Amino acid sequence: MEIIPLSGYTEEEKLAIAQGHLIKKVRERTGLSAQEFSLKKEIIELLIRHYTRESGVRGLERELSALARKSLREIYDQQKTKHTLTKAHLEKYLGPQKYTFESASQKALVGVTSGLSWSEVGGDMLPIEAAISYGKGKINLTGKLGEVMQESIKTSLSFIRSSAEKYGLEPQMFLQHDIHVHAPAGATPKDGPSAGIAITTSLVSVFSEIPVRHDVAMTGEISLIGRVLPIGGLKEKLLAAVRGQVKKVLIPYENKKDLAEIPENVKSAIDIIPVKHFDEVLKHALVQMPKPVEKVNLYQRAKDIAVADDLITSSDKRQGVSI
């Protein structure tokens, strides 16, 4: 048996299917005319976005059928000849919105980066938050993160530590602070190899105290030397970025070839920037680039500390001081 994977419909494709096929099918089933049952484009978009979450359109057809049946009842009770559905009708007939989507922050925040995630029913925004507090270098991970994401966090930390001076960070900061990485919506399991650069950006931001731009989202894994590695589900993630109202999306350079499969209306709605190395990510993601500090020779520092300890000990012995 051969398994052929198929990507789900985009919101624009679902809208076209609803307007060209589903609404007509529902009208025929309930006996309603175009005047008695009509939906404007924005109402169909609300129905797709907040009352269904699926890769296909079966759930959308069920919701349209429910709207048609309740419209038929109202037309019969009130003897109407024309009935156009509004947002108020959606809430009246179908109840409160069933699904919501993450949107970009309204302002630049320190330690908060907009990542992008993929699932079988489409893409969504995935905020990555980082915070530090005085401690001894302990790492806390919350948000029901899977093994792959936990490995991404460890890789990000190792990369930042090895390149600390380049990003304006003192190496001893990592030993003097506890680090907490969190992905909101903790009841939802999160895993996959595409959050590396978002995690690394949040960590650099929180240590350097430089905010992350609120209108930038990103997807891509990171290597120990800072390479941005390719990801899957690019189409769904870019659709989530458009829905989340971001202006710029950073993607791995190796995924540039996949842009040929992305609808033109999506590519025209956002600025898509392929990146090869994490240095390029920071140029677009942070409000300002951190200033590098002088690189520390760890061997020489250890030697200087040892010499200083010897001098202090010798001095204390001469002065008869007990510590």
Image: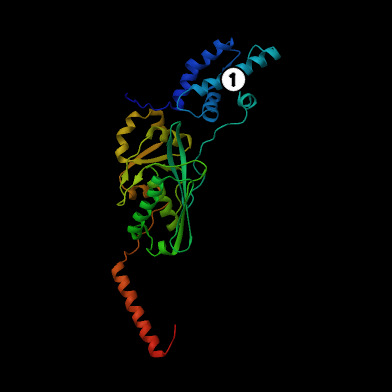
Horizontal and vertical percent for residue 31?
A: 59, 9
Most distant residue in the right direction:
78
Horizontal and vertical percent for residue 156?
A: 37, 52
Q: Nearer the viewer, residue 148 or 125?
A: 148
Q: Which colouring convention does the figure follow?
A: rainbow
Most distant residue in the front direction:
1
Rendered image quadrant of residue 56: top left
Structural crowding at the residue carrying mark 1, measured as other residues with C-alpha within 10 Å and reported as few (<14), some (14–19) or many (≥20): some
The amino acid sitting under disc 1 is Ala
Q: Is residue 164 above or below residue 60?
A: below
- For the point 43% across and 32% down, the residue is 120
Query: In the rendered view, does 178 fall on the left or right side of 277?
Result: right
- Residue at mark 1: 66
Is residue 265 among the parts visible in the rendering?
A: yes
Q: Is residue 66 above or below residue 98?
A: above
Is residue 83 among the parts visible in the rendering?
A: no
Horizontal and vertical percent for residue 145?
A: 45, 46
Q: Nearer the viewer, residue 250 or 309?
A: 309
**Callout count:** 1
Q: Quadrant of the C terminus?
A: bottom left
Q: Nearer the viewer, residue 262 or 140?
A: 140
- For the point 39% across and 32% down, the residue is 235
Q: Is residue 1 above or below residue 101?
A: above
Q: Quadrant of the N terminus?
A: top left
Query: In the rendered view, does 5 fall on the left or right side of 13?
Result: left
Q: Secondary structure at mark 1?
A: helix
Horizontal and vertical percent for residue 278?
A: 34, 49
